[in-house]
Image (tube, helix red, strand yellow):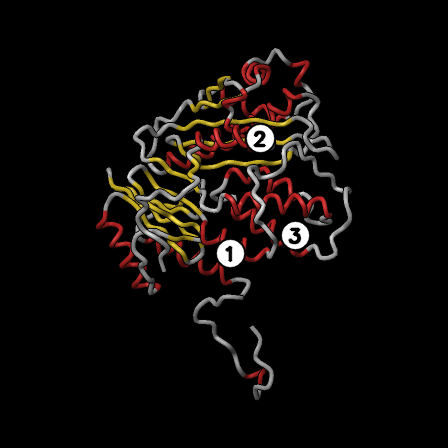
């Protein structure tokens, strides 16, 4: 810190920092260290697979604290342990208990008889009011069918800041909207030099968001806590680089918990290779999810079923005799085969029409899109028996 200008005898004065302040470079690190030491002193253990997760176990009792800067979610099956944690935190940091979770980091949490609904209705309304465009025309898909965006097609935008801001906000909206993942990753590729064609595609996406503003994820109340994964790819989908698109999603208890739509970093020589790379990405996510859930006390998840709609890729993941086809592929892609052999993953074939990860690799017709979103547990309307609202 520097002594403020105008103070007398600045060389004889020292500013003593008694607590970390917002705005200082070291503030966030000092706060995390302080909070971590406090939780560890109370018997919590930091998860190796998510450093913002602290877990305390005693026999059958478990208490979990999920930390985001100075916002903390507390849950568990022992109310006395949870109350003790809040008392200790209040004694050391002077916290405010907001009660049952209803609103956290832009996520709205509603409770129904069939499960928990996660949505971002408030954030969606703010996003739509910020854009100042005419969104009265309805759109049934996140992007137009068969749309191929090129990096150099169309005139450059005079003011690209609006495009960048809206795409950034849409990226945050994908936290509870898997149906937007492919469209947002597509639009994000042109942030540096957005053109009119990209702007038109963005308007289409915003019209779709306006039509589905109340959509969210239903986390089903289920005793069947099995983990399954779906992986897919669209070979040579990028018209400029001919790179493929990777898409995967993991379901836990029939509800989506993690997903991704991303352009592959390397050009694949065949559709089988592209699918193999997508399967490797999904296998990596499965490995992380299994270890994290085991930290939370959820075991017996192996083997995890990994669904793929490409028969050749399934054979490559199991049988090393396809050396001639795969000898040019980087070693990290063979990660899937290792997980299959060690029993963590069981790969299986399913038809393309039932491939849930299809929505992360291409724009589907509205009918097929709605079918897959229904299977994912996406809710297009707020249930009438929703309890709770936005908290303080």
Q: Nearer the viewer, residue 119 or 76?
A: 119
Q: CA distance from mark 2 to mark 3?
A: 24 Å
Mark 2 or 1, nearer chain start:
1
Q: Is residue 40 visible?
A: no
The reply to whether dot 2 and dot 1 touch (C-beta < 8 Å) is: no
Q: CA distance from mark 3 to mark 1?
A: 16 Å
The reply to whether dot 2 and dot 3 touch (C-beta < 8 Å) is: no
Provide the residue designation for mark 3: 163
Which element is circle 1 on? helix
Residue 227: % across, % down: 41, 28
Q: Is residue 33 above or below residue 215?
A: below
The residue located at (34%, 33%) in the rendering is 298
What is the quadrant of residue 127 in the picture?
bottom right
Provide the residue designation for mark 2: 364
Provide the residue designation for mark 1: 126
Residue 137: % across, % down: 58, 45
Q: Which is more foreground, mark 2 or mark 3?
A: 2
């Amino acid at each position: 810190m520097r002594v403020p200008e105008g103070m007398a005898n600045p060389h004889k004065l020292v500013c003593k920092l008694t607590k970390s302040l917002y705005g200082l470079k070291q503030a966030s690190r000092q706060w995390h260290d302080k909070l971590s030491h406090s939780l560890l002193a109370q018997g919590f253990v930091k998860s190796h697979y998510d450093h913002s997760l602290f877990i305390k176990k005693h026999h059958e009792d478990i208490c979990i604290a999920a930390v985001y800067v100075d916002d903390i979610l507390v849950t568990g099956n022992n109310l006395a342990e949870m109350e003790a944690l809040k008392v200790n935190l209040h004694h050391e940091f002077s916290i405010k208990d907001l009660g049952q979770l209803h609103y956290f980091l832009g996520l709205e949490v509603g409770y129904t008889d069939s499960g928990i609904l996660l949505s971002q209705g408030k954030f969606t309304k703010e996003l739509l009011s910020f854009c100042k465009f005419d969104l009265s025309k309805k759109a049934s898909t996140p992007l137009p069918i068969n749309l191929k965006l090129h990096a150099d097609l169309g005139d450059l935008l005079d003011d690209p800041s609006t495009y960048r801001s809206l795409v950034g906000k849409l990226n945050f909206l994908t936290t509870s909207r898997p149906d937007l993942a492919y469209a947002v990753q597509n639009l994000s590729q042109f942030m540096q030099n957005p053109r009119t064609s990209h702007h038109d595609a963005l308007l289409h996406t915003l019209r779709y968001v306006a039509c589905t503003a109340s959509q969210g994820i239903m986390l089903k109340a289920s005793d069947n806590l099995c983990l399954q994964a779906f992986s897919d790819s669209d070979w040579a989908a990028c018209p400029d680089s001919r790179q493929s698109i990777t898409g995967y999603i993991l379901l836990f208890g029939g509800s989506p918990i993690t997903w991704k739509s991303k352009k592959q970093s390397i050009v694949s020589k065949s559709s089988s290779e592209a699918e193999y790379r997508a399967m490797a990405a999904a296998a990596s996510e499965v490995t992380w999810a299994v270890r994290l859930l085991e930290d939370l006390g959820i075991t017996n998840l192996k083997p995890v079923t990994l669904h793929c709609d490409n028969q050749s890729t399934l054979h490559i993941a199991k049988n090393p005799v396809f050396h001639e086809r795969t000898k040019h592929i980087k070693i990290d892609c063979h990660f899937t085969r290792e997980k299959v052999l060690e029993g963590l993953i069981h790969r299986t074939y399913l038809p393309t029409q039932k491939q849930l990860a299809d929505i992360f690799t291409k724009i589907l017709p509205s009918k097929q899109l709605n079918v897959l979103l229904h299977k994912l547990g996406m809710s297009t309307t707020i249930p009438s028996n929703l309890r709770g609202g936005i908290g303080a």
